[in-house]
Image: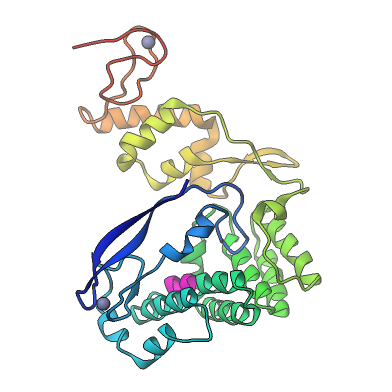
Amino acid sequence: MTRIVDKLLRCFVCGTLSEQRLPYSTHSRGSPDLDGRPPEMARSTMPVWVQTCPECGYCATELSQGDPSAREAVQRPTYQEQLHAADTPFLANRFLCLALLKEAAGRDADAAQQRLHAAWVADDAQERALAHKYRSAVADALLARREALRRWRGDEADWKGVERVFLVDVLRRAGRFDEARREVDAALQQGVSSIVRQLLGFEYTLLEHEDVGPHTRDEALRGSSLQEAPPPEVIPLVSYIQRYYSEWMTPQEEKALSMGKLRTPEGEQWATDDPQVLALLAGGKHAIVHALEQRLLTEHPGKVFINRCPKCGGLARTPQARQCRYCPHTWRE
Ligand SMILES: [Zn+2]
Ligand SMILES: [Zn+2]
């Protein structure tokens, strides 16, 4: 289910009030494209990813907020020409305007993301030449600023070299096959995690066929010796700590608690190369979550409460609950 809400917002640049549509919640099922485009339903909510002031033309993901540089940038002729360009889909213009503002604010990775959104709009409108052009601009920006690429994509999956898959996919879909192949070779030489090697191998095959179409991550892993393992068993204490006490967890602990597994020819492995996270997971999820419970109780006495049923020991749903979800027992103080 996707929920969109209408809201009256005051423009950050000119102060005009206007009604805007905001994404409230959405669910996605399935695998993203190799360039990060989400599956449905999130895919269809693109028109509400950017808001536009009807008065001054300011484009933003949240119209009432922005970087101070936007006040001057929306006045520029290049900005206004882009917003009103008649030969591009209107939604693409708005993403490209957003990209201009991100560039004015010195946020290269965000700008590249917005140009990529414009490419997705062009894909949907069957505007091949425009889609190539926008992707090429994304590729140029990322080739020039590799640290921006790592900042942007390096964290999305915990696999060494995953940002290279993204760059290769953008180059391939822009028709820049030779450069894409060089990126694959360079990445393999530098060493990447086994799942990234699999994804790059898939890209290599697409490059051989000069295929510029969209392909999903699932597709890239299908039939390979590497598969995402089925979701692990649900451990109530994990979700309880994640929900109520995540503020006291280290980034590595957070990562470890939500880590999934891969099936490889050598058996199941945690889907990470991070040595600290692997060390935490060495004893499995039960071990790390019980160690975490002890640490939180010791370091935050009186603030952390692991609410267990006095009768059966089952974990209650919330720190305030007075009713067991496993046995009929209820308790009052
Ligand atoms: Zn405005
Ligand atoms: Zn109980």
Q: Position of residue 20 (x, y in %)?
A: 32, 64
Residue 246 shows in this picture: yes
The residue lying furthest to the bottom in this view is 77
User: Is 267 contained in the magenta span?
Assistant: no
- Against 21, residue 226 (above or below) is above
The structure's colour scheme is: rainbow
- Residues drawn in magenta: 108-114
The residue lying furthest to the right in this view is 209
At x 55%, y 57%, the residue is: 38
Q: Position of residue 205 (x, y in %)?
A: 79, 65
Q: Position of residue 317 (x, y in %)?
A: 35, 24
User: Is 110 contained in the magenta span?
Assistant: yes
Image quarter for ligand 2: top left
Front position in the image: 177 or 36: 36
Quarter of the image holding residue 199?
bottom right
Name the dominant secondary structure of the magenta segment.
helix
At x 21%, y 74%, the residue is: 16
Q: Position of residue 125 (x, y in %)?
A: 59, 73
Please state if 320 lies on the left or on the right of 268 as rendered.
Answer: left
Quarter of the image holding residue 162?
bottom right
Please state if 61 lies on the left or on the right of 162 as rendered.
Answer: left
Front position in the image: 289 or 81: 81
Front position in the image: 331 or 306: 331
At x 73%, y 40%, the residue is: 266
- Against 29, residue 205 (above or below) is below
At x 43%, y 45%, the residue is: 252
The quadrant in which the C terminus is found is top left
Front position in the image: 34 or 300: 34
Residue 147 shows in this picture: no
